[in-house]
Image (cartoon, rainbow, N blue to C red):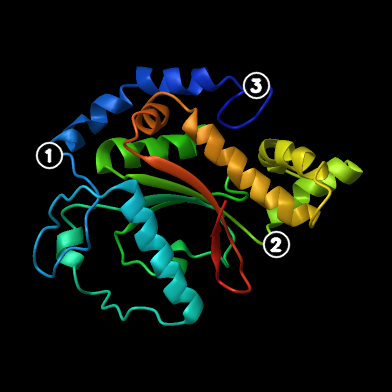
Amino acid sequence: MCTICGDDDHLAGTTRRDFLKTGTMAALAPWMVGQAFAADPPKLGSAPPPNAITPQAALKRLMEGNARYVANTLEQKDFSAGRAARATAQYPIAAILSCADSRVAPELTFDQNPGDLFVVRVAGNVVSPDLLASLEYGVQFLGTPLIIVLGHSACGAVDAAIKVVKTNAVLPGHLPDLIRAIKPAVLVAEKTSKGDLLENAIAENARRQADRLRTSPPIVQQAYKSKKIDIVAATYDIGSGKITLL
């Protein structure tokens, strides 16, 4: 089984080896010069200075931002400020693996500025080779100290996985490939006697995807083991706007 996407028919190493063989890493090499670490928002008219921020500080800043979002006390932002500085470099304080659901907007829910978050999105917030490569870029070249896997309430992808498990529903197109990565979470959630199946499966899926990242070599796994980054799972409640760490 692929430890990245959960597909029984996919070998994780193949894509990674092909990725290395194509010389893509060589193409990225120039970006390693003056490699930056996550930083505070840049000041108007100046390049954002490299500023190492700990995973704990990044998480605290994001959860404080979510509290403002829930209370509808968002910080006033001038989105034109800092554009010139952002054109020269980026220093995101966190990478977010989020669902593609249109009701989930990480920059808003964490009340962050442009350039603060490195966001990758896919239905069901599942880890795949392509998304893993994006997160590797954030860790390796942007110095991103934190990865949050963000599930959300009423997730249609997880609900579809439940229907597949319960009724053997047949889905069109490439949807079965996506659902295959979510089904293990549904099977675990089914064994939970308390709570709602959909809510439990959403939380379990976020936890499982975070676990996959922690064990995904070479870049993310190594950075996590060496405590350079942290990886956490969370869920976002669409109705209240509240993010809960799992």
Q: How many marks?
A: 3
Locate the N terminus and report the quarter of the image it occupies. top right
Residue 160 appears at what percent x and percent y?
A: 77, 50
Judge whether 72 appears above or below 48 on screen: below
Task: Using the rendered image of the protein, determine whether residue 177 is visible from the camera's viewpoint.
Answer: yes
Residue 136 appears at what percent x and percent y?
A: 37, 35
Label 2: state its secondary structure.
Answer: loop
Which mark, residue 74? none
Determine the residue positioned at 17% across, 63% down: 42
Determine the residue positioned at 39% across, 33% down: 224
Disc 2 from disc 3: Cα separation: 28 Å
For residue 73, side relative to residue 126 (left or right) = left
Q: Which residue is mark 1?
A: 34
Judge whether 114 appears above or below 3 on screen: below
Which mark, residue 154? 2
Amino acid at the residue labelled 3: Met
Q: Which residue is mark 3?
A: 1
